[in-house]
Amino acid sequence: MTPDLEQPAARWLARFEQALRAPGEAPLRALFREDSHWRDVLALTWSIRTLSGTDTLLPELQRGAARARPRNLRIDPARTPPRKVIRAGTETLEAIFTFETDAGRGNGVLRLDPEGKAWTLLTALDSIKGHEERIGKARPKGESYSRDFRGPNWLDQRRAAQRYEERDPAVLVVGGGHAGLSIAARLTQLGVDTLIVDRWPRIGDNWRRRYHALTLHNQVQVNHLPYLPFPPSFPTYIPKDKLAGWFEAYVETMELNYWAGTEFEGGGYDEDAGRWHVALRRADGTRREMRPRHVVLATGVSGIPVMPELPGLTDFRGTVLHSSQYGDGEPWRGKRALVIGTGNSGHDIAQDLHSAGAAVTLVQRNPTLITNIEPSAQLAYALYDEGPPTEDCDLVTVSVPLALLRKAHQMHTARAREIDRPLLEALERTGFKLAYGEDGTGWQFLYLNRGGGYYFNVGCSELLVEGKIGLAQFSDFDTFVADGARLRDGRLLPADLAVLATGYHGPQALVRKLFGEAIAGRVGPVWGFGEDQELRNMFRRTPQPGLWLIAGSFAQCRIYSKYLALQILADELGLLPERRAALEAGAVPG
Ligand SMILES: Cc1cc2nc3c(=O)[nH]c(=O)nc-3n(C[C@H](O)[C@H](O)[C@H](O)COP(=O)(O)OP(=O)(O)OC[C@H]3O[C@@H](n4cnc5c(N)ncnc54)[C@H](O)[C@@H]3O)c2cc1C
């Protein structure tokens, strides 16, 4: 550790701990810049929240500290030592620290300005005392099946656990993509009985059934699942079938309970019992009712397909597919296709059809952000190339408040625009309309706010520029007719296939479909940033007791599954503030 970098951070932490105990606000105020940010992830507030500006954050910090009693704040010797870094264009001293509270152990990230004042502070819960993850030295000893020659062995126990014949899980996770696997793995390590259900017949089918040439968009080091990193031999961009195979291995290795071929049909919440009653339909047609205390929706950012009523579409004699129904280009060899929508799905499907030998026209409805997959789309993940282990990068990621994240992404977007200039100018010459996201914040914020609206170019843009895939603007469309689409200038775009790559209604629509209007209304909008600078109803308590949501990238799910699992465990233990109040009042069974 470099003492001249460690000392200022260690000194600040010591003064901070004293200031938290001291009467009045002045000692604390002296430690923070006026425009500083504090993000708390469960440690002091049992919530995920960001507060900006000392007038706002100091009173909350004092309240949280009075309740959680943080202490023993010190630089964590086991983690990346304090270092000078550039964050959102500003040089800062960044230090990872550790601490404890009455309830648990935490870690955090402190960023100091050159005057030694805090610019940003993260306090995050890492574990609940007495309920630590069963890993490393705390790994299971396997006493229940070891060296008992007549009793059930490990496999017998695993099989019995997965059958759920005489019990229901505490947590039912709907969706077995990476979001579902991440939260189930975390909960299982915390000893919370968890079952994943997914409607696809085989684990990994959510990737397997996607287009033939698919490889992941982010590099392998960003995409690890919790606990079990991809082997170092894995390719930089993992192909879909390899990923699907890894999911199967992950479920097996992490001992996750997973029912494939199982549709979650929805259900309701029994307030008195503090449990759900939900219906599952198994692949053999049988139904099973369950009464879990928690339901985690891990059903993706995309909820229900948007099927717009396009003029004349019912007169069209060709095939109409939503992008979610598109499988493979082979059946369309020698045929003509219109692909409506210019996000990732639209571009990828157009390229897949073209490579299969179809004549394709891509139809643009809205200006779209285009960024080359390499290097531009990877700029946002430079942190994961700095050298520190994934765990430290994840903590640093959590520590960046929204205001700084926006600024960082504006910078990445401007840089990507420079790098991609030749392609972007060539696209504009074809008539393609470009966008750069709200306030130039780029693809990441389009994803976080809308779940789409951009394309990572893996070759389709060049096909458009070279005229190998046609381009039409939706504003030039008049109507679909039997043989294709007629443009306002009278020209016909003949087509045998129309693919509507028109996106999805967000997760709130799915909440409504599964649980009804009352619960959807109570929960409100899902995904996209709320006024509190956090993603709405994601990774934290929703207004509906027992309902949780997790979605997003591999990295987001790896990171936030930890905190979501801690909240569910805390709820099970009666530690969450409202639940504790209800328990004390005898309103909810323990
Ligand atoms: C080409 C491409 C490359 C990508 N590359 C990356 C990348 O590198 N890194 C990254 O982070 N992201 C990447 N993504 C984006 C994203 O991570 C994926 O789209 C991912 O599938 C989202 O995972 P998920 O677990 O949230 O949801 P999904 O994969 O959509 O899984 C949801 C699951 O829920 C199930 N389900 C839904 N409703 C029900 C129900 N009622 N009952 C039972 N089961 C149900 C579905 O069957 C499905 O299996 C990429 C996407 C594409 C298309």
Image: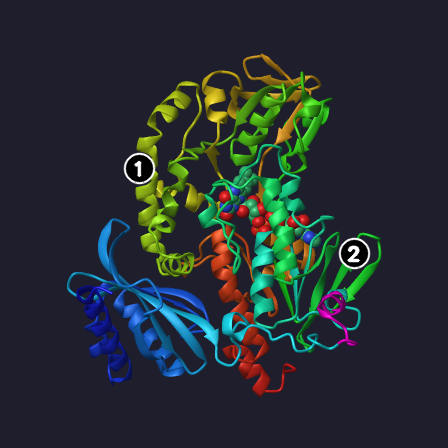
Q: Residue at x 48, y 46 (%)?
A: 220
Image position of 575 with respect to 523: above or below: below
Image quarter where the C terminus lies is: bottom right
From the image, tell me which residue sits under label 1: 415
Asked whether the viewer can see residue 57, the reply is: yes
* Pick the front one: 570 or 72: 72
Asked if the magenta segment contains residue 153, the reply would be yes
Apparent side of residue 212 relative to residue 373 in the rendered image (left or right): right
Disc number at residue 207? none
Circle 1 SS class: helix
* Pick the front one: 306 or 570: 570
Residue 335: where, in percent of width, then height? 67, 18
Q: Residue at x 84, y 53 (%)?
A: 285
* Pick the front one: 142 or 104: 142
Circle 2 SS class: strand
Instruction: For label 1, count other residues whose C-alpha is less than 10 Å away and answer few (under 14), some (14-19) or many (20+).
Output: some
Residue 208: where, in percent of width, then height? 65, 41
Q: Is ligand 1 less than 8 Å from the beta carbon at label 1?
A: no
Q: Residue furthest left?
A: 115
Q: Which residues are magenta?
A: 149-160
Residue 483: where, in percent of width, then height? 69, 17
Image quarter where the N terminus lies is: bottom left
CB under 8 Å between discs 1 and 2: no
Asked if the magenta segment contains residue 313, the reply would be no
* Distance of label 1 from label 2 (alpha carbons): 49 Å
From the image, tell me which residue sits under label 2: 281
Q: Quadrant of residue 262?
A: bottom right
Which amino acid, mark 1?
Arg
